């Protein structure tokens, strides 16, 4: 079976199929950077059709393959810059949380950070000023210290 895959009539097709599979993987999960080896394998497969398998091991064949990989890398990076969003990731700092509202996911207890609250889809450790706040209760952030919040019922 292995000899068949390495035969001069089949190997170019194997290279092209593997290259196309890598391009499909790249299309399915952009950023995986499979476009470069995929393009290089397709280039190797196509050139071996025209020049034979011996060409692949020649200095010219190796040089052309390296240039094909470099060109594919440059084009891939250029395309990712064009299609990627320009917005910066959102960040949450301590000061930006004060005054925000959310809800309790795990009971919040006075002076204990064992409670959990969700604010803007992010879960934080929390304590309250007095008493306890049961799950599902709407809260407001009154203070923040690191990743721990102090909250009150709204």
Image: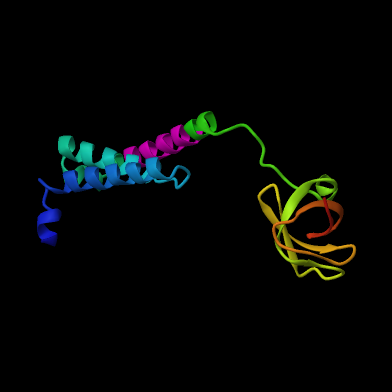
Judge whether residue 24 is colored magenta: no
Secondary structure mostly taken by the magenta-highlighted segment of the chain: helix
Q: What residue appears at the point 48 percent right and 44 percent down from the top-left corner?
A: 31
Judge whether residue 71 is colored magenta: yes
Part of the protein shown in magenta: 62-77
Q: What residue appears at the point 44 percent right and 32 percent down from the top-left corner?
A: 75
Percent position (x, y) of residue 10? Answer: 12, 48
Q: What residue appears at the point 45 percent right and 47 percent down from the top-left corner?
A: 32
The way the protein has been coloured in the rendering is rainbow
Q: Residue furthest top?
A: 82
Percent position (x, y) of residue 123? Answer: 69, 57
Percent position (x, y) of residue 133? Answer: 79, 63
Residue 106 quadrant: bottom right
Residue 9 quadrant: top left
Q: How many marks?
A: 0
In front here: 138 or 72?
Answer: 138
Percent position (x, y) of residue 50? Answer: 16, 34
Position of 109 with respect to 86 (left or right) is right
Image vertical order of residue 119 relative to residue 49, above or below: below
Position of 110 with respect to 38 (left or right) is right
Query: If the image is split into quadrants, where does the N terminus sit?
Result: bottom left
């Amino acid at each position: 079976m292995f000899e068949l895959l390495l035969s001069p009539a089949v190997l170019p097709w194997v290279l092209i199929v593997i290259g196309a599979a890598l391009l499909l993987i790249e299309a399915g999960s952009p950023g995986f950077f499979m476009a470069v080896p995929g393009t290089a394998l397709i280039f190797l497969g196509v050139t071996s059709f025209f020049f034979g398998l011996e060409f692949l091991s020649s200095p010219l064949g190796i040089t052309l393959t390296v240039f094909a990989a470099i060109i594919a890398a440059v084009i891939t990076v250029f395309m990712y810059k064009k299609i990627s969003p320009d917005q910066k990731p959102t960040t949450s700092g301590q000061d930006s949380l004060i005054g925000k509202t959310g809800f309790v996911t795990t009971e919040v207890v006075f002076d204990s950070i064992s409670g959990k609250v969700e604010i803007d889809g992010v879960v934080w450790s929390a304590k309250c000023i007095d008493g306890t706040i049961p799950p599902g209760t709407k809260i407001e952030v009154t203070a923040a210290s690191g990743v721990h919040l102090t909250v009150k019922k709204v």
